[in-house]
């Protein structure tokens, strides 16, 4: 009976959520991150912060994607070491920052919050990076605040019309969103699209993640209405005036790798790295390789 109860508890979604949250908190602690809450007037951002060993080192701001959270950057943060001050926020509508139906989730609004965050932390300039929606927001930041942007790092970024539609984009065109989860089966199909080489996660933890997606479905729909329909980058990439690193997983099923050529052709100062066989989140699938690419890029910048 006891074994049966324990087995049943293991498969309850709440158990998976608890294990996921505790595991992420433990990893953050092990990697030297401090969780902070920074009040910005109408919103308080939750973030991870880790100072560099050298006070004069550059600051690297890392922005997660749609429906994700700051935790996706933890292993990348560990891999990149202590040569940078790391600032990793939960963007509005996500993670521990939470959701408010009155907030704007447009990329420019999110970028303005990042600017206010840097103001509050007294950071004059930063290397601003992002994955997916976070890459779109980072690009909007670089366009709006070039004087605050040392360089831009985009990893499988959203924001341009792909020459070849991805598997996810084909679903969107049929009126379906793979991010809108109603069942465990829906989540399995979505999760399979996110990474080609995902790290191991127990099934009961994935079930907890699936339940969390279902709980936040209505919120994610509102966020998508803002970030997918405003402040896109078609026709704007040529205005990015800072050095830019573009990293793209060759097996990305959410944002097709054909978009990488658009970025590479239109951003004036850029370096493109394609990771064959990797999906939508190289910093999760290959944290060491991605961290090395970012480190080499930042070290190549003038005065770095």
Image (spheres, rainbow, N blue to C red):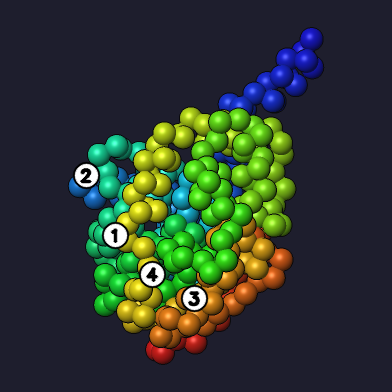
Using the numbered discs, state the Cα–Cα distance from disc 2 to disc 1 in whole angstroms: 16 Å
Q: Which mark is residue 42?
A: 2
Name the residue nearer the viewer: 145 or 47: 145
Q: Is residue 59 left or right of residue 214?
A: left
Q: Which residue is mark 4?
A: 234
**Between tags 4 and 2, which lies in front?**
4
**For the N terminus, which image quadrant?**
top right
Could you classify mark 1 by the number of other residues whose Cα lies within 10 Å: few (under 14), some (14-19), or many (20 or more)? many
Q: Which residue: 42% across, 63% down?
A: 159
Tell me: 141 left or right of 166.
left
Pointer 2 local density, CA inside 10 Å: few below 14, some 14–19, many at least 20: few
In the rendered image, which residue does mark 3 sit on?
262
Chain-order first, disc 1 or disc 3: 1
- The residue carrying mark 1 is 108
In depth, the one of 174 and 229 nearer the eye is 174
Indicate the secondary structure of the residue bearing disc 1.
helix
Between 102 and 287, the one nearer to me in the picture: 102
Q: Position of residue 183 (x, y in %)?
A: 60, 30
Q: Residues within 10 Å of mark 3 (few under 14, many from 20)?
A: some
Quarter of the picture holding the C terminus: bottom left
Residue 49 at x, y percent in the picture: 42, 57
Q: How far separated are the C-alphas under marks 4 and 2?
A: 31 Å
Of pointers 4 and 2, the one earlier in the residue sequence: 2
């Amino acid at each position: 009976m006891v074994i049966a109860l324990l087995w049943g508890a293991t498969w309850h979604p709440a158990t998976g959520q608890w294990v996921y949250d505790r595991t992420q908190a433990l990893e953050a602690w092990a990697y030297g991150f401090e969780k902070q809450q920074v009040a910005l007037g109408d919103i308080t951002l939750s973030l991870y912060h880790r100072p560099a060993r050298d006070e004069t080192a550059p600051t690297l701001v890392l922005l997660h994607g749609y429906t994700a959270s700051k935790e996706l950057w933890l292993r990348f943060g560990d891999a990149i070491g202590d040569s940078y001050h790391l600032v990793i926020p939960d963007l509005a509508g996500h993670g521990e920052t939470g959701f408010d139906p009155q907030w704007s989730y447009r990329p420019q609004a999110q970028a303005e919050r990042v600017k206010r965050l840097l103001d509050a932390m007294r950071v004059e300039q930063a290397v601003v990076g992002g994955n997916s929606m976070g890459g779109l927001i980072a690009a909007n930041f670089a366009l709006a605040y070039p004087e605050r942007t040392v360089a831009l790092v985009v990893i499988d970024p959203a924001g341009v019309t792909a020459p070849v539609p991805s598997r996810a984009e084909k679903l969107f065109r049929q009126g379906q969103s793979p991010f809108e989860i109603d069942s465990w089966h829906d989540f399995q199909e979505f999760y399979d699209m996110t990474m080609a080489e995902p790290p191991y996660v127990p099934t009961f933890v994935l079930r907890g993640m699936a339940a969390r997606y279902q709980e936040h479905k209505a919120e994610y729909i509102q966020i998508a209405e803002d970030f997918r329909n405003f402040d896109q980058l078609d026709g704007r990439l040529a205005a990015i005036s800072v050095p830019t690193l573009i990293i793209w997983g060759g097996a990305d099923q959410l944002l097709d790798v054909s978009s990488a050529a658009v970025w590479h052709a239109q951003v004036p100062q850029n370096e493109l790295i394609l990771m064959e066989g990797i999906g939508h989140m190289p910093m999760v699938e290959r944290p060491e390789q991605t961290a090395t690419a970012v480190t080499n890029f930042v070290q190549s910048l003038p005065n770095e």
